[in-house]
Amino acid sequence: MGGNNMKNPLFIIEGLDVSAYAMAEELEKDVEPFFVKKVDYKAYDSEGRILTLGIVMKEKPIYFGLFKTAVELVVVQSAEVEAMHANDLRDALSKYLKYQNKENTEIYDKMSLERLVQKFIELNGFVKVGKLFAR
């Protein structure tokens, strides 16, 4: 495996849907274990490294710390040292931006991956991870 040499932001792509996360911790807080187990997705860092989402079990205190229970938590790490899938991420971002902005779509075909990442964030921002669900 590639370890944790991820470059933010991070992207999850499910079909034509694209979600951006400012950092790994926010992705791990937002994505449910069910998603990792059941949904056909791809995950990338901003340079096009494939990311793997896994599930770990962790004990957490409940009832004011009187008891503990095991919960599933999502963890993310890079599956590649070098960014081998930059074109895949570039294509996904370009398709999404073309779909989102129906006018002047040819500009996205000419943009670099770095510029597409910037444009995506400029237009869509990051997934908002609420404190209500923070771990």
Image (cartoon, rainbow, N blue to C red):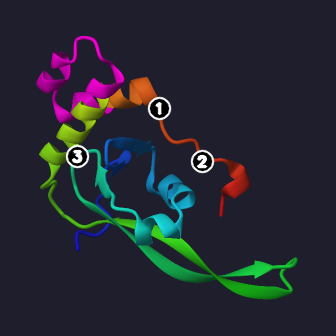
Q: Is residue 73 magenta?
A: no
- Image quarter for residue 93? top left
Task: Give the alpha-carbon distance from disc 3 to disc 1, as whole Å.
Answer: 18 Å
Predominant secondary structure in magenta? helix
Q: Is residue 62 left or right of residue 109?
A: right
Q: Which residue is mark 2?
A: 129
State the extent of the magenta-drawn residues as a range: 98-117
- Image quarter for residue 49? bottom left
* Residue at 26 percent of width and 25 percent of height: 98
Q: Amino acid at mark 2?
A: Val
Q: Which residue is mark 3?
A: 47
Q: Residues within 10 Å of mark 1 (few under 14, many from 20)?
A: some
Q: Residues within 10 Å of mark 3 (few under 14, many from 20)?
A: many
Q: Secondary structure at mark 2?
A: loop
Q: Is residue 34 left or right of residue 119?
A: right
Task: Give the alpha-carbon distance from disc 1 to disc 2, as whole Å.
Answer: 12 Å
Q: Secondary structure at mark 3?
A: loop
Q: Amino acid at mark 1?
A: Gly
Q: Which residue is mark 1?
A: 125
Which percent across, then down, holds residue 100? 35, 25
Which percent across, then down, holds residue 42? 30, 57
Relative to 63, is 108 above or below?
A: above
Q: Secondary structure at mark 1?
A: loop
Quadrant including the N terminus? bottom left
- Image quarter for residue 103? top left
**Which of the two residues, 116 or 100, is positioned nearer the viewer here?**
100
